Image (cartoon, helix red, strand yellow):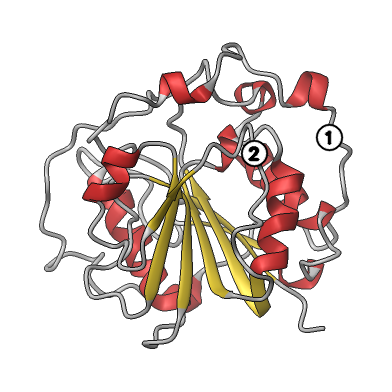
């Protein structure tokens, strides 16, 4: 297990293999016919530390939780997959001081996170922010239905103790064909991550998050649920010098009707 914080220094990827990535080469790593798996909250979603998360996250953490290469490629992927117009509405769920969005992102970005100091510092949040603990209040009633083109959740989906409630709310607030993009690596706070996460390998974690989408198919189209691994020695090298953090994407689209 890797710790949640990464201390790698800023690195210039502009003249490397990562500067122009062909994301059309990504292969879906989910099985062809994934099945819904029942979630047992009393065992799967229980955590070592069940104290109020607002205490744990009260102190700002201006650190990165994945290494430079993973952040750079994730940003490139967002450029590739997120629609960008002046009217594009984006929600950065579980946001902090960085959203991993490209610096020149076009659209209106609203952040929802736990620490106001971090949210204030985030340059991507050009459409305001909301301070909210989804583990005490998974409702997103402050947002109208069918209002967002994309919802992002970067390296945080493994901390949700009411995942289906949150996924249902995201499905509600997405526009038809809107997309929810989750990402994660192998770094986490072991006392705050859901208990099931620690017991799974990385492929099982991919399938677990895909199960959240499949279990909320009142909104999400199961045929659009896909998962990708960036650093698998096929798409990109698993390790490159000091860079070795894996990066997984699991995403799905809201039904059109």
Badge nearest the viewer, 1 or 2: 2
Query: Which of disc 2 and disc 1 is earlier in sequence?
Result: 1
What distance separates the C-alpha of mark 1 from that of mark 2? 19 Å
Residue that mark 1 sits on: 39
| Local secondary structure at mark 2 | loop
> In terms of image quadrants, where is residue 143?
bottom right
Please indicate whether residue 103 sits to the left or right of residue 87 in the image: left
- Vertical placement of 237 versus 49: above or below? below
Q: Residues within 10 Å of mark 2 (few under 14, many from 20)?
A: few
Q: Which mark is residue 110?
A: none
Question: In the image, residue 136 lies at what x, y percent?
Answer: 63, 32
| Local secondary structure at mark 1 | loop
The quadrant the C terminus occupies is bottom right
Q: Nearer the viewer, residue 106 or 10?
A: 106
- Vertical placement of 61 versus 129: above or below? above
Question: In the image, residue 28 lies at what x, y percent?
Answer: 63, 64
Residue that mark 2 sits on: 137
Residue 244 in view in this figure: no
Q: Residue furthest front?
A: 142
């Amino acid at each position: 297990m890797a710790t949640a914080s990464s201390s790698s220094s800023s690195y210039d990827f502009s003249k490397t293999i990562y500067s122009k990535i062909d994301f059309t080469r990504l292969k879906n790593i989910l099985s062809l016919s994934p099945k819904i798996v029942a979630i047992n909250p009393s065992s799967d979603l229980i955590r070592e530390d069940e104290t109020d998360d607002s205490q744990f996250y009260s102190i700002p953490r201006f650190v990165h939780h994945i290494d430079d290469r993973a952040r750079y490629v994730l940003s490139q992927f967002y450029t590739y997959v997120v629609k960008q117009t002046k009217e594009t509405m984006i929600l950065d769920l579980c946001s902090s001081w960085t959203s991993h969005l490209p610096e020149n992102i076009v659209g209106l970005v609203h952040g929802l996170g736990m620490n106001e100091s971090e949210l204030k510092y985030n340059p991507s949040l050009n459409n305001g922010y909301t301070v909210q603990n989804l583990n005490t209040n998974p409702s997103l009633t402050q947002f109208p239905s069918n209002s967002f083109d994309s919802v992002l959740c970067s390296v945080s989906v493994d901390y949700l103790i009411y995942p289906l409630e949150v996924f249902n709310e995201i499905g509600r607030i997405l526009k038809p064909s809107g997309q929810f993009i989750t990402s994660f690596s192998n770094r986490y706070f072991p006392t705050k991550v859901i208990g099931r996460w620690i017991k799974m390998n990385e492929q099982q974690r991919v399938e677990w998050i895909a199960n959240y989408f499949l279990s909320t198919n009142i909104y999400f189209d199961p045929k659009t649920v896909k998962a990708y691994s960036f650093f698998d020695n096929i798409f990109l090298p698993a390790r490159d010098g000091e860079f070795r953090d894996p990066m997984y994407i699991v995403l799905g689209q809201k039904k059109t009707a």
